[in-house]
Image (cartoon, rainbow, N blue to C red):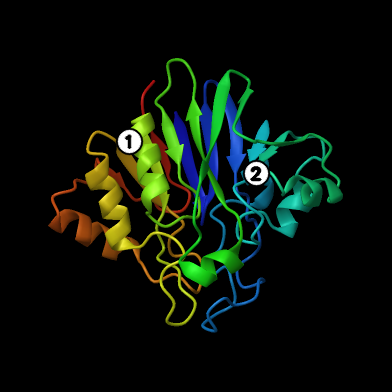
Amino acid sequence: MKLQLIRNATLRVTFNGRLFLVDPFLAAKGTVRSFAGIAQNPIVALPLTPEAVIDGAEMVLISHLHVDHFDEVAMTLLPKTVPILCQPGDEATIREKGFVDVTPVLSQHTWQGITFTRTPGRHGYGELAERMGNVSGFVWEAADEPKVYWMGDTIWYEPVAEIVAKYQPDVIVTHSSGAKFGDSQPIVMDVAQTTAVCQAAPNATVIAVHLESLDHGTVSRADLRAAATAQGISAERLRIPADGETVEIGS
């Protein structure tokens, strides 16, 4: 498996000999509204051109429809015939954008020898989580590949912990910016929750993404690395890639 972090949650993934794109957010720096009143988003530029990000993508996997996970630039540039997998309830909006091969994953779906199992998520706490709406993660499985649990935009809570215990993934991808609105609780994992994932899955490689790209993020890569080191979590167990960096695991 090869996983290239582009920016935020956007990934180019080579898995089972196939290339797919995750949560494409391709806007130019500073062209999206501020989320925290600090700066226009995204706060960093893409490491590649948008055209290079989508080049060769055979499928697109979308966790939910917030702008930083599937934006107008991606909707415009992607071929309308590319297969898209999404959570139930998002398919109509995606089809309205002209995409013709859209599959809502109710529970499980197999594409090109890869089985995608949809998993629950909670995008924050209490009433704010309700307002943030439905989000999903996915477990990816294929013969001769590591088992991957891409958690999506979620906090660390019991249903997510249960997925880790049930599937025993080899690789876990966390969204770890600790994003907040004002003095709210985090709407995705923060430092403590990301290291809790590492402690709950001591045999997994955790890859932390969704960092240093939006103005409501509160966690830096340096913060997360320092906390992990203090807890005895090595740089091999917790990978924190830079934008544009590729992580390769397994065959």
Going 46% across and 57% down the picture, which residue do you hit?
A: 210
Is disc 1 surrounded by few (<14), some (14 to 19) or many (20+) residues within 10 Å?
A: few
For label 2, the residue is: 87
Q: Which amino acid is tagged 1?
A: Ala
Is disc 2 surrounded by few (<14), some (14 to 19) or many (20+) residues within 10 Å?
A: many
In front here: 170 or 130? 130
Going 51% across and 57% down the picture, which residue do you hit?
A: 8
Going 38% across and 30% down the picture, which residue do you hit?
A: 167
Residue 220, above or below 250: below
Q: Which amino acid is tagged 2?
A: Gln
Going 59% across and 47% down the picture, which residue do you hit?
A: 63
Residue 189, above or below 119: below
Q: Earlier in the sequence, mark 2 or mark 1?
A: 2
User: In screen coordinates, is 47 left or right of 163?
Assistant: right
Q: Which mark is residue 165?
A: 1
User: In screen coordinates, is 167 left or right of 81?
Assistant: left
In front here: 69 or 250? 69
Q: Quadrant of the N terminus?
A: top left
- List x then y, in percent, for residue 235: 23, 46
User: In screen coordinates, is 214 left or right of 106?
Assistant: left
- The CA distance from mark 2 to mark 1 is 22 Å
In the figure, residue 226 lies in which quadrant? bottom left
Q: Describe the element under mark 2 as helix, strand or loop.
A: loop
Q: Quadrant of the C terminus?
A: top left
- List x then y, in percent, for residue 148: 43, 33
- List x then y, in percent, for residue 48: 58, 51
